[in-house]
Image (cartoon, helix red, strand yellow):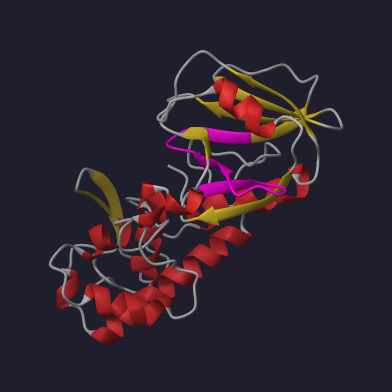
Amino acid sequence: MPELPEVESVRRLLVGAVLNRPILEVHCGAQQLRRALDPDRLRTELVGARFAAVDREAKYLLMRLEGRDGAVLVHLGMTGRLLVVERERPTQPHTHIVVGLEGGVDLRYVDVRRFGFFCWSDTPAAEPSLLKLGLDPLADGFEDRFVLQARSRGVSIKSLLMDQGVIGGVGNIYASEALWRSRVDPRRRAGQLSARRLKSLAEAVRAVLLAAIEGGGSTIKDFVLPDGDSGGFVKLLKVYGHAGEPCVRCGELLRKIRQAGRSTFYCSKCQR
């Protein structure tokens, strides 16, 4: 599933590709997404308007229209893609929404597994899924607020990092990377860690996310950027996907375990 760096990388490319272009047409496929498609509503709201801003909340995108309070709310789910392509390019399978823009350009939402969505919201600030989000890991003061939340929790520290009600936008990839960077064993209970170690972990979360954004995110399997490129940060991952390889810090072979049904990658020697 695309995490914060992938979604932010998509957002940055969309800003340069779709803003201020008049929307000429909207076409929707017949299949439903995780949230029900309403083709007539999308056409009514979008055709004749322009995208004025693209914002991000955790793993959600909000595509705002000029002079309007509402927005298109997008979540990429497991396999969703937002592509900006020339209109004459053939439509690929699993394309569910095509937004035709002035200048011969389409914005296309493609989603093989259909766990994402692309829908209109009259009041995006009141969306339940956004109201439930936890701390923004890129916001000022994140580290201290995270320490306060984590010290009383009895769950594993990796599960806590991935809880969207605690931190918005961190998933399996960057939780593993931040834990390795801060030398924290992913199996440790959050409340067992000192305030100093929790703050070091929070700093690692921020640093890893910022580095991944600069690298365009990580393409493990399905993720691609709107221009069709892959996320280059996958080449810089230290532990995720590297089970059985030597830890680049200490040489111990990296391990892979299951936590809450998800794969966790870590070094048993230098993560304590």
Count of numbered tags: 0
Which quadrant is the N terminus positioned in?
Answer: top left
Q: Residue drawn at (39%, 71%), measured in percent from left and top?
A: 181
Q: Is residue 193 magenta?
A: no
Q: Magenta residues, as a range? A: 60-82
Whether 128 is drawn above or below 147: the answer is above
Residue 127 seen: yes
The x, y position of residue 101, in whole percent, is: 78, 32
Q: Foreground residue, 212 or 31?
A: 31
Whether 135 is drawn above or below 34: the answer is below
The x, y position of residue 262, in whole percent, is: 26, 45
From the viewer's perspective, tell me whether residue 2 is left or right of residue 180.
Answer: right
Which quadrant is the C terminus positioned in?
Answer: bottom left
Q: Foreground residue, 123 or 211?
A: 123
Q: Is residue 73 magenta?
A: yes
The x, y position of residue 138, in whole percent, is: 50, 69
